[in-house]
Image: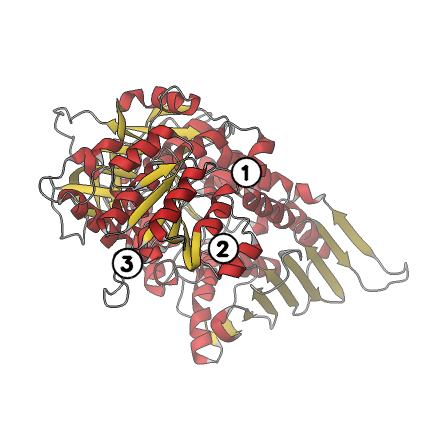
Amino acid sequence: MKQVVQNYKSGELAVLDVPVPGCKPGGVLVRTAYSLISTGTELMKVSEAGMSMLGKARSRPDQVAKVVQSVAVNGVPATYRKVMGKLDSYTPLGYSLCGVVEQVGAGIDDVKVGDLVACAGNEHALHAELNWVPKNLYAPVPDGLAPRHAAFGTVGSIALQGVRQGEPQLGEVALVIGLGLIGQLVVQLLAAAGVRVVGADPDPARCELAERLGAEACGDPGSASVEAAVAELTGGHGVDQVYLAAGGGSNQPVELAARLCRDRGRVVDIGKCRLDLPWNAYYEKELDVRFSRSYGPGRYDPEYELEGRDYPIGYVRWTERRNLACFLDLMARGGVDVEPLVSHVAAFDDAVETYRSLKDGELKAVAVLFRYPERAEEAPEAPVVAVPAVNVKRTTARAAGTPVRVAFIGAGNYATSMLLPHLAGREGVELSTVVTTTALSAANAQRKFGFARATTDLDAVLGDGSVDAVFVVTRHSSHADLTRKALLAGKSVFVEKPLALTEDELAGVLATVEESGNDRLQVGFNRRFAPLLQEAKQRFGARTGPANLRYLVNAGRLEHGSWYLRQGSEGSRFAGEGGHFIDTASWLLDADPVSVYAVATPGNEDLQVVLRYPDGSTATISYVTTGAAGFPKETLDLVADGKVLRLDDFVRASVYFEKSTAGRKRWVSSRLPKARDKGQNAELAAFFRAVRTGGPMPVPLESLVATTAATLAVPAGLAGGAPVTLAGHR
């Protein structure tokens, strides 16, 4: 299928061929009929992409702060790869469309194939021929409403939510500053609610349009006409509400709002404009400043938007889905007319030229629609290749010179910044296929790293006999199931941590190993492969007595909206990350733990996990989220036999020895922070060596299972308040 994309680094716009998105449970696959260009939000994004790197940094200081923090934690190379990977990727455009349901996912019963729906969301209602849309981000189109008008549903919801924040009442007077697409819709909604409206915009054509659509008077915000209209309609008291629907860097809108608003009036910010509030003016009138968050309640809540958990109507009357349905209904009943706003309808194939014309000012428009071609008759699809559950008989070695053919399931941030840069161009490795649930991420990975093929069809990849190794780099909740499927298909498997989120999932993986005879499995525990730590362990030497190990992980707080916070579906944060640190401790102690004891601060934010080993050694992992951001993320001390090994965040390692006749001995090795190496490259080299030669996997299966079991024992230890014995695993 085709999709409109933009490279944020170069500013390039393109209509790209990408795989068709899969139809996941909890949503529908929609074939687009019309999609709407937001001439405000989208053109701002397009303009930012054309800036220099310095210009981009100035426009997004919030992102610059994140980069600085990432450098402190991960070092310059890793941060550079991560940032440039994001910048030099195709990003989607669009967030408002109308289309026909082509496929219905499990759990959906309110629409059927062939129904017309309006869709919302900058990740789900894109300028693309097909989109997967979760339940709370679509609404059925009422009978009689034209698809080109239904495509306005999302921007209409934004305007509607802004009006709701203003709490207009019959007979009041409102000022709308900015008469672009959102401002024009706000004017109509207010007029429909019995509010008298004054508009302000420097464009005379937009002022004239707003007056045709219900405004009492409109004019340039710098002229006296707007103030005169307000004075006449309000008897000199000022308007009851002001709606800021303007963009740009001028502070004129908020100053005008203060001047023309009545005492204790309401000012609602809908657009993205400068908000340096003049304190005296706002204080003296005691103005009520409110913000309108996009389409309404539910926006930016992943449980609502992605998992389909609705808010009870008795507590939240107008959610973003109910706003979407309400606006569609208003259009269907003639309460709002969007046809006068349509300045241009372009063929979808002409998207790049349309954006260029808008950006250069050749096309003056309030609203522009893309019209998509009707679906052509297609040849019948080939039957899906079933993945047989067969006993796998491995060869001991591959033919000399034969490359290892690799498929990636998932191409998210970790895969593209920490794994694939080490594989692109690696001798003896052929990147065969990348499969993702979202079409654009697969296309980005194919372009950047040279995969031969990109797809969203998992079964076809697993059934491809030419693929030797599969990398599972997806959300945590899918790791165990995808690992089982890949093992049953006879592949060597590299799965990012964690291997499993529950004991049942772990047991299922082991049952699959027994069933298939395929134990070619590696979990992404990379720290044991870090060159600095490996050298430190070698310098430390063998032990004769038990050891004490202390591992401080200064994990830091998660950003709001991080999928790590979805404990119900993705497990706890420690369940996802903790295996790294347990594996490192076990490798340093040359054994697997026999018991786990865990305690936590209130809210389970900071954990203390104590592992006991067969020879009496102990490892204490302090996993904290409340530490200082500037402190190193990982520090480790290993003490035994009069020796101390110290690791400081994979930048510096030291080994101290007992005093001898030659005096105190000490070994120290340091790296520049930018050279921090946590072992990913060496780990991948070991994995491919094992696949190529048929030799043992880099980490024994028993160790992978023991580490996973110890990680899973932490919640049980927290609940029971006593040590948990690890037994019964192979």
Local packing at callout 1 (Cα closer than 10 Å; few below 14, some 14-19, many 20+) is few
Mark pair 2, 1: CA separation: 20 Å
Give the mark nearer the N terminus: 3 vs 1. Answer: 1
Q: On the rendered structure, is 307 left or right of 62?
A: left
- In-front residue for pair 585/630: 630
Report helix, strand or loop for mark 3. Answer: loop
Can residue 365 be seen here? The reply is: yes
Q: Amino acid at mark 3?
A: Gln
Q: Are marks 3 and 2 in contact (CB under 8 Å)?
A: no
Looking at the rendered image, the disc whose residue lies closer to the viewer, 2 or 1, is: 1
Residue position marked by numbered label 3 in the rendering: 169
Locate the N terminus by quadrant: top left
The residue shown at (13%, 53%) is: 109
Looking at the rendered image, the disc whose residue lies closer to the viewer, 3 or 1, is: 3
Q: On the rendered structure, is 686 left or right of 630?
A: left
- In-front residue for pair 481/214: 214
Is the residue 580 above or below the residue 207 in the image? below
Local packing at callout 3 (Cα closer than 10 Å; few below 14, some 14-19, many 20+) is few
Q: Amino acid at mark 2?
A: Glu
Q: On the rendered structure, is 392 left or right of 708?
A: left
Looking at the rendered image, the disc whose residue lies closer to the viewer, 3 or 2, is: 3
Residue position marked by numbered label 1 in the rendering: 59
Give the mark nearer the N terminus: 2 vs 1. Answer: 1
